[in-house]
Amino acid sequence: MSNDTELEMTTLSLSYNGIQVIEPYAFLGLPRLHLLDLSHNRLESISARAFHGLPDLRSLYLNHSILPEATVQLSNALHTQSLSNLHRLELAGNNLKSIPLTRLDIFNLHALVLINNSIESITGENVTNLYQQRRLRVYLSLNPFWCNCELVAFYYWLKNSSQCPDAGRLLCSEPEAKRGILLDKLRGEDVDCMNENLEAVSYVFLGIVLALIGVVFLMVLYLNRGGIKRWLNNIREACRDQMEVYHYRYEQDSDPRLANVAV
């Protein structure tokens, strides 16, 4: 292929090629490339400069390609100004646990496909970035979302935004009581930390109050130990005197001679 042909290439599909490594500047010399498809490979290593030299790239497909050891490297590779014109990024089926983009404003993204990954929650920082990128559409179905209070920011983003076209297909995976429930069918209190936090604070406060009462009680006992000791001695003496009276009466009642005298 001539150099002129390479320079004019706009589409390059390398899917199903068993590619394991993307080296630095692997696509240098393709400044007009608009679409790059690397789906269905087995990427173990991705250089931080893998996508340098692609200023006109509009679509990047990496579906079912990223092995676990390359996940962190992927984030570094995507964090480049060379992809400032990227419109569509597809990362479906890669067992990703989070959005692999620390920033969204370095791209001109219109579509981010993250379906069929291992994302359990979307962080508050990611939600803030999504609110700021109003044109962006994020696809998130087939992820195992944990529907607890950590999901609250993402939950309200789904409710108040139209940026997730497949929001009606997002399902809770955990906890078990909510498994299979659609996220958009949840109520605010199902993911709101406020009530849980208030209840936890109440129990902590009650524990502190009981502990203080116990400390005060022990201090009172300690400061009055002399009086308490005398009080206990007095009770013991009174009990002993009472027992002696009972013992004396018992001896009188049980002696038959005393009984005859009484007759």
Image (cartoon, helix red, strand yellow):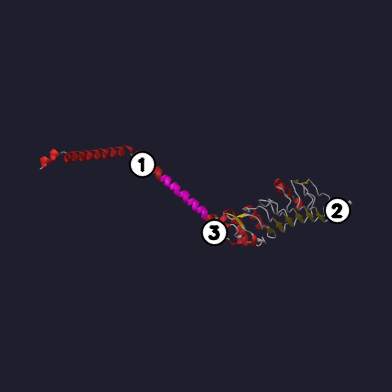
Indicate which disc, 2 or 3, sits on the residue closer to the N terminus.
2
Disc number lying in front (2 or 3): 3
Q: Does the magenta stretch include residue 200?
A: yes
At which x and y percent is residue 44? 74, 46
Q: Which amino acid does label 2 sit on?
A: Leu
Q: Would you say 165 lies left or right of 47 here?
A: left
Q: Does the magenta stretch include residue 193?
A: no
Residue annotated with mark 2: 7
Q: Would you say 244 lies left or right of 11 here?
A: left
Residue annotated with mark 3: 189
Residue depicted at 88% across the width and 51% down the height:
3
Q: Can you say which quadrant of the picture contains the C terminus?
A: top left
* Residue 85 in view here: no
Where disc 2 sits, the SS reads: helix
**Chain part drawn in magenta:** 195-212
Disc number lying in front (1 or 3): 3
Indicate which disc, 2 or 1, sits on the residue closer to the N terminus.
2
Cα distance between the residues tagged 2 and 3: 56 Å
Residue annotated with mark 1: 220
Q: Would you say 165 lies left or right of 174 here?
A: right
